[in-house]
Image: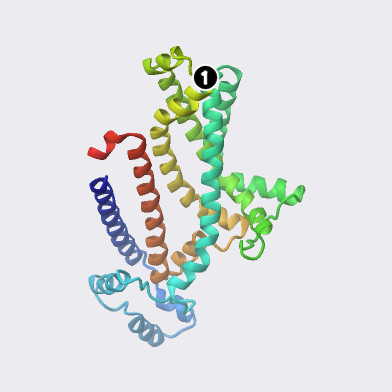
Amino acid sequence: MVTFLVRRVLAGLVLLYVLATAAFAMMSLTGTDAARNVIGTMATQEQVTAKTRELGLDRPWLTQYGDWLSHAVRGDFGTSWFTGEPVTDTLLVKAPVSLSIVVAGLLLATVLSVALGVAAAVRRGSLDRLLQLTAIVGYAVPSFLMALLLSATVAVQLGWLPATGYVPFTTSASGWLQSITLPAISLSVGAIAATAQQIRGSVIDVLRQDFVRTLRSRGLSERRVLFRHVLRNAAPPALTVLSLQFIGLVGGAVVTEKVFGLPGVGSTAAEATVNGDTPLVMGVAVYLVFIVVVVNLLVDVAYGWLNPKVRVR
């Protein structure tokens, strides 16, 4: 198991390095004049040249990247060119907002998809057709459109939940829950549809296997067979889908945060990219990739626990 984990960690580090390099390269190809954006459009060419030299943008690309990487491996992602705040401090403030809605959306998707998928597999018929319809709607409606619909109906018209804003958990637990409910729901709809379909198919496949008939012939209750044996064997494919859905949730959070006015990492990254704020963009990129790598590592560990054959690969 240790070798299995070491291989996964090394693969995650390689992925982190490759994506960070690609992100830095793409930022240099955007053509954004970051120096002029920082000091304003009314600045003279001499001022822009001086600011370019101050930011180090006059140096070769490899020199800039090597300098950033040497600091990044020590946990120093530099200072935002526009706000003047350390990138790490900005991430510490923004990250809880994004993690709140993404984790809440993932938990909601997990619970509902398992419930719907198992119910549809066990009681095929009207419930199965309802799941198919739900899946079609979930696939067809993007998260940003769902966010707009929920904001307009539940928040504005009905007034049940706030339409915009974020309340930290440390300030008010109930306020925090209310502020992340609609964003989490809008993010989770597509994930529920995809994962429920996967769980339904996996449970049906497992129910048809010989060992299930053997367990039933021994007198085990249907509930015990289903939740102790069938679900464990049907879980690995669903875990793979959930890990992929998590990446989708992270990407969807960018637009969702904009719709609900949440000061999260996604909205910060969008603004920093437009401004050409390379230190902040790179800090956000590394943070997001790191979160995805950690989640995939946890999924691999769970997969290895559910299926010991995976550990020897």
Q: Residue furthest top?
A: 217
Work out whether residue 142 can be spotted: no
Q: Position of residue 101 (x, y in %)?
A: 55, 53
Quarter containing the N terminus: top left
Q: Residue furthest right?
A: 158
Q: Quadrant of residue 74?
A: bottom left
Q: Position of residue 168 (x, y in %)?
A: 61, 63
Q: Is residue 106 above or below residue 47?
A: above
79 left or right of 72 in image: right
Residue at position x 61%, y 53% from top? 180
222 left or right of 36 in image: right
243 left or right of 65 in image: right
Q: Secondary structure at mark 1?
A: loop
Coloring basis for residues? rainbow
Quarter containing the C terminus: top left
Work out whether residue 57 can be spotted: yes
Question: Disc 1 marks which amino acid?
Answer: Ser
Q: Position of residue 191 (x, y in %)?
A: 50, 39
Residue at position x 53%, y 44% from top? 107
Q: 69 or 277, which is in the foreground? A: 69
Q: 12 or 77, which is in the foreground? A: 12
Residue at position x 44%, y 40% from top? 242
For mark 1, what is the residue? 221
Q: 115 or 51, which is in the foreground? A: 115
Q: Quadrant of residue 111?
A: top right
Q: Position of residue 291 (x, y in %)?
A: 41, 55
